[in-house]
Amino acid sequence: MRLVRRILFALFGLAVLILIVWSLVIGPVAAFRVVTHGTTTVWDYLEYTGRELSVSSSPQRWAVAADSFTPPEVLVDGVSLSLTSLLVDNESLAFVVVHDGDLVYEWYAPDHGPDKPSMVFSVTKSIFSLLIGAAVDDGLIESVDDPVTRYVPELEDAGFASVSLHDLLQMDSNLDYVEGDNPFGKHVKFNYTDDLTSNILSLRLRDVPDVSFRYKSGDYAVLGLALDRALGELTITGYFEQRLWEPLGVEAGGVWNTDTEDGLERNWCCLAMTARDLARFGELVVRDGLWEGERLVSAQWLQASFQPAYQADRWPLDYADSPLVNYGYGWWLTGDAWVALGKDGQYVYVDPARDAVIVRLGESQGDFGWVDILRQVAERTDE
């Protein structure tokens, strides 16, 4: 028994030591949040600090043409299934279809609804890229070819003078950042830290240059700090409200999570909004940056946003079997459609040729990828 007690005591001591080292690596606040809350969820906007996004002063309700579209049967692995059953069986929260500017179909899970926000995770990157376009249009950012050090000079000594805003937008920066759930890794630390700026300034470049696309949220974290510096006293959320949120006439409120109450937005992951309001950003893209006669984003920016960034030999084998065949400015490209994609199955599917925007939100991805399903639904809108 004495030996058993010694072994148990030693194991306990080892566990405590690991916990202490881990908390020192990612920071005590981040460690506490991971331990007490666990992995990120679509309800994180209720758990952590953030800046509120108000309902528009002039909400623009979607024109509803619900009788013009019937939820289709869709093929999954050669089997025809009803769209409704797929939504119910795969932890979906919301599904909205907009066609020709009208809301033609919407579905919500029980206890969810058109006025209830949820986190859209990396769909935030796609929306943030539109905000960068607005900043270029406004002259706050002179050019995406600017080195990031023009806006964040503290990164000069780490070699970031060779990294342009364009590199960050297309995730071609050579940043030493690994996307993943490693509890000792940068990604977990960035998701939970209460000192985002310090962590961004501590980033470094890899010794070996990247030769292909590598998905990494750290690129957008650096881009966020650059925009924050360009804005001066105005917060990213405040600028977002002025340039996009308010003019789009959003029907419900939202939240943009920050590291502290007065801190920096987590611009790669952490917008929360409703499915209806999220569809507005897809519709803005379909309308080539115009909304109710007002230009919110330049046509030139959108054209650049959806240019394939990578040649076939620079597209990683990891994506070889994916329908997502290229990456633009924060948007995935697939065929003639563009996709904003977030963790746990958050999607905005934009089919400009069919004038269709489809939003799927969920608590998880479910048992399959949604891109092909969304494509089938978009095709059905033209029938």
Image (tube, rainbow, N blue to C red):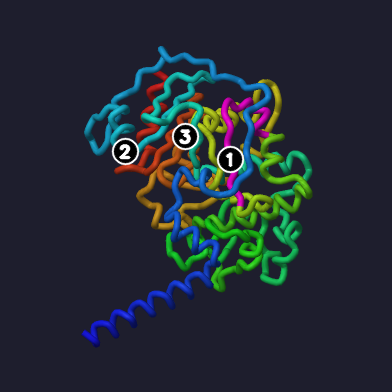
- For the record, the magenta segment spans 244-258
Q: Which residue is mark 1?
A: 255
The residue most toward the front is 1
**Front label number (2 vs 3):** 2
Mark 2 neighbour class, 10 Å CA radius: few under 14, some 14 to 19, many 20 or more: some
Q: Which residue is mark 3?
A: 349
Residue 26 in view in this figure: yes
In terms of sequence position, does the residue under pointer 2 or pointer 3 come before the other? 2
How many angstroms separate mark 2 from mark 3 (CA)? 18 Å
Q: Which residue is mark 2?
A: 90
Residue in the image at 58% along x and 25% along y: 251
Q: Is residue 174 left or right of residue 241?
A: left
Residue in the image at 57% along x and 32% along y: 281
How many angstroms separate mark 3 from mark 1 (CA)? 22 Å
Is 239 magenta? The answer is no
User: At numbered mark 2, what does the secondary structure look like: helix, strand or loop?
Assistant: loop
Nearest to the observer: residue 9 or residue 146: 9
Nearest to the observer: residue 194 or residue 227: 194
Measured from the top left, where is residue 206 in percent x and y?
56, 70
* Dot 2 amino acid type: Asn
